[in-house]
Image (tube, rainbow, N blue to C red):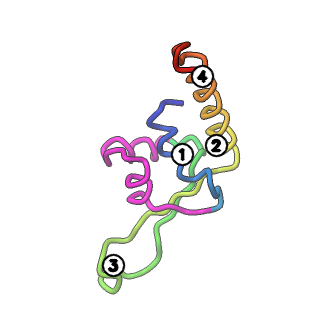
Amino acid sequence: MSIQTLKVLRPFLTDPRKELSGAEIIRISGLASGTAYPIMLRLERTGMLTSHWEKGDPKKLGRPLRRYYRITAIAAAQAREALLEIADLAVILKPAEAL
């Protein structure tokens, strides 16, 4: 998994049952929409994320409808494992004087 993909998935890991809008994912991840949305689409196509459009009338809501995403259990486990591997690598690659 790329760092950008992990940045998209990381906001879900504190509560994998939580749904996040695309805008929330972008805000939390710090990625540009042109980077985050293609990643979310790819993750959805591979079954790592599920999504749905919110129900309602955009005129009554006063804004466009939002698309909400949820991480799958398998993706959450894979993301946690990848983040642990990155943390392990960071320790290994840390200069000796910094230890």
Which of pointers 3 and 1 indicates the residue nearer the eye? 1
Of the image marks 4 and 2, the number of the one nearer the N terminus: 2
> Tag 1 or tag 3, which sits nearer the N-term?
1
- Point out the image quarter for the C terminus: top right
Q: Nearer the viewer, mark 2 or mark 3?
A: 2
> Which disc is residue 91 wearing?
4
Instruction: Give how far apart the Cα atoms at labels 2 and 3 are.
Output: 31 Å
| Marks 1 & 2, CB-CB < 8 Å contact | yes
Q: Nearer the viewer, residue 75 or 88?
A: 88
Q: Secondary structure at mark 3?
A: helix
Query: Residues under labels 1 and 4: Cα distance?
Result: 22 Å
Is residue 34 in the magenta section?
yes
Q: Is residue 27 magenta?
A: yes
What's the CA distance linking mark 3 and mark 1? 28 Å
Amino acid residing under circle 2: Ala
Mark in the foreground, 1 or 4: 4
Earlier along the polypeptide chain: callout 2 or callout 3?
A: 3
Disc 2 target residue: 75
Label 4 vs label 3: CA separation?
48 Å
Q: For the magenta stretch, what is the residue range?
A: 18-42
Q: Amino acid at mark 4?
A: Val
- Mark 2, Cα crowd under 10 Å, few <14 / some 14-19 / many 20+, is some
Q: Which residue is mark 1?
A: 9
The residue pinned by badge 3 equals: 58
